Amino acid sequence: MTSATESLPTRTYGSLRAAWIPLAALCMAFFVEMVDNTLLTIALPTIGRDLGSGTTALQWVTGAYSLTFGGLLLTAGSAADRLGRRRVLLYGLAAFGLISLAVIFVNSAGELIVLRAALGIAAAAMAPITNSLVFRLFESDTLRMRAMTIMIIVGMSGFILGPLLGGTVLAHLRWEWLLVINAPIALIAWIGVRAGVPADRAEDLTGDRLDLPGALLSVGAIGAACYMLTSGVEHGWVSVPTIGCAVGAIVALVAFVWHERRAAQPMLDLTIFRFGTVRGAAVAQIGTSIAMAGVMFGLILHFQYAYGWSPMKAGLANLPMIVTMIAATPISEGLAKRYGHRIACVVGAILLAGSLAGLAWGVDHGYPAIAVCMVVMTIGLRTVMTICAVALVDAMPENRTSMGTALNDTAQEVGTSIGTAVVGTFIAALVTVSLPSGVWSPELVASFFHGERITYAVLSVIVGVVAGWGALTLTNSHSVEEAH
């Protein structure tokens, strides 16, 4: 063990510049897993024609990834805290690259769905660990917040730019290249992590055995809950599949809580939720993801259908969010430094709710009005997401930081599912179940705008309550030590 780590760098870095190799590698790993969430969305019609698949199969092409990814986040975080974060990430990157290359052998929609589910498993082994390792590169809270800011910007960029990058590639290459390109990115990230990220010290890991019953129950609860939201949009909220998933999720959740309270070495120590920082940060992250996913999904429909823009132009329309994520750094850091976590996140929650209320007014007032709301929303996202991510991981015991980031990512995945489901349900109920392609009639555009106004008004209330309640539970301190 000693010989394997002698050539590795010191455990922490004194500046972002000194840590550029591991930071860049971890950012690449995070980018490739996030961009894969939305990359194939724009290619679904092409995939359907090439593989002769129907609408339901195409929905599973994207749904299979989200289902395995969201369901396994807690399990992957738990495994990393026991087996080694760097080791699990290296295995995840290798698997992600190799599975992506397997797309060249895909000949049917079923095979592609299986491949996407496998990619979701590999991504789950990467997501909580990349953030945990970034956190561990530095001891300074300021550097940790700035590094997490970079990670969040990169991750959001991947999520937002997925359709734009997909449309650009499809203009010149076959759709398979959208997955093949993952392999060299994963390889470069693997080399960077291997060279620049120190191996975990034994004292920073937990010696507890893996809680396999807890892992299975958590996968069942989260997976069933995520699919319930998807099924509600697709089949209806009172359909047999939706109700069955709801019942299954509740039963699995109750069984998970019962098991974890009695297990000698639980996967997730539920007593951590007694601490306001852990509980509040997770709840606030759900609120931010409801806002982000709801707006992203709603505006994709708005730009491409109501405005008739091309996928590339619709992707470019989201650039104000990415630019603001970078430019808002002094604002969010200034709020946290001057007022502490609680007040800063309350301000962020107000900005989120206010921007959604602004969108309810701005959807039929042209793109400039929408862009302003996007900027305001991104400042709120930037503030709440970064502070809560840092506070949540910092509040966890040293040998549970991967579980902290897994909780953070799981909360965001739940929020993403809720935000998408809210928009999809309201549009289906208020406008039309099937959005027609081509040029829309003025009547349909007016109906769509009306549906959007109600949708964003409802989202404004939901996000304000959820993110605001979570923010109020945080402490005003800058370094969180209550869970140690």
Image: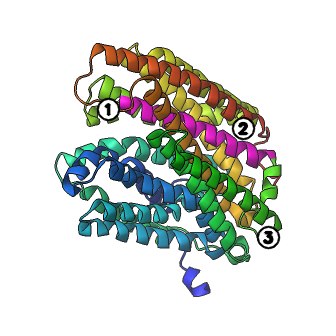
- The numbered mark, 3 or 2, whose residue comes first in the sequence reads 3
Q: Between residue 313 and residue 450, name the one nearer to us.
A: 450
For disc 3, the marked residue is: 263
Per the image, is 279 magenta? yes
Residue wearing tag 2: 470
Q: What element carries label 2?
A: helix
Residue type (three-letter) at the residue carrying disc 2: Gly
Residue 208 is one of the magenta-drawn residues: no
Q: How crowded is mark 3: few (under 14 residues within 10 Å), some or many (20 or more)?
A: some
Q: Which residue is disc 1 drawn over?
A: 314
Tell me, yes or no, if residue 146 can be seen here: no
Asked if the residue at tag 2 contacts the one at tag 1, i.e. Cβ–Cβ closer than 8 Å, the answer is: no
The amino acid beneath tag 3 is: Ala
Label 1 – label 3 distance at C-alpha? 50 Å
How far apart are the alpha carbons under marks 3 and 2? 28 Å
For numbered disc 3, what is the local secondary structure? loop
- Please name whichever residue, 246 or 109, is drawn nearer the observer in this view of the structure: 246
**Taking the image as drawn, is residue 180 in sight?**
yes
Instruction: State the extent of the magenta-drawn residues as a range.
Output: 276-301
Residue nearest the viewer, comparing 122 with 158 = 122
